[in-house]
Image (cartoon, helix red, strand yellow):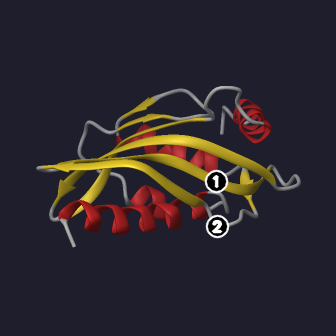
Amino acid sequence: MSELDDFVSQTAARHSHATTCVRNGDPTSFVEQLSTHDPVTLFPASQPAQLGWAGVSQAIRRVASVYAGSDVVAFEVVAAGVGGDLAYLVGYERAASSIEGGAAEDLVVRITQVYRREGGEWKLVHRHADPGPGGSAGASHLRQAMRDHKDD
């Protein structure tokens, strides 16, 4: 297996698990995959951009607080690359998820994630997520929930 194949298989599986946990209200696995060495950045689909581990990890905790009862997040990799100690994944996350205890809604976001190799492990240093052109009802509901919980 090539370095790229190894990166994609391991990182995509870890990402799917961590994102599924977030969509079930538990941010722990996602926060653990974040680099603790700046720069760490987040351009989320549902709240303001964040810079630095503390802000990014808090934003992940905040979004997890409005989720519950999600299907397993399917992560479709569209493109990936590895070069030295940097790597990236581009793709789509798809799952039906409950937001604020409501009925599960399909929520699809396109994502770009950048990783840095630290101590032999790939750590997430940047995430950009958005619903894409036309948006989605699930993404709109998530944005509203995050506006309602902006002081949490």
Residue 51 bears which disc, if any? none
Whether residue 13 is situated above or below residue 103 in the rendered picture: below
| 130 to the left or right of 25 | left
Which residue appears at 76% of the width and 50% of the height? 106
Q: Residues within 10 Å of mark 2 (few under 14, many from 20)?
A: some
Residue 72 bears which disc, if any? 2
At label 1, the amino acid type is Arg
Q: Give whichever of 48, 115 is nearer the camera.
A: 115
Q: In 3D space, how far apart are the residues under numbered discs 1 and 2 (Cα atoms)?
A: 8 Å
| 86 to the left or right of 133 | left
Q: Secondary structure at mark 1?
A: strand
Instruction: Give the residue at the far left of this rendering.
Output: 84
Instruction: Give the residue at the far bottom of this rendering.
Output: 1
For residue 120, what is the image quadrant? bottom left
- Mark 1 or mark 2, earlier in chain: 2
Which residue appears at 29% of the width and 55% of the height? 123
Q: How many marks?
A: 2
Can residue 77 be seen in the rendering of this structure? yes
Q: Secondary structure at mark 2?
A: loop
Q: Which residue is mark 1?
A: 94
Can residue 27 be seen in the rendering of this structure? no
Which residue appears at 63% of the width and 35% of the height? 131
At label 2, the amino acid type is Val
Q: Give whichever of 60, 107 is nearer the camera.
A: 107
Which residue appears at 51% of the width and 63% of the height? 16
Which image quarter is the N terminus in? Answer: bottom left
**Residue 73: image location, x then y, percent:** 61, 61
Whether residue 83 is situated above or below residue 121 in the rendered picture: above
Q: Disc 1 vs disc 2: Cβ atoms closer than 8 Å?
A: no
| 66 to the left or right of 102 | left
Instruction: Give the residue at the far right of this rendering.
Output: 103
Which image quarter is the C terminus in? Answer: top right
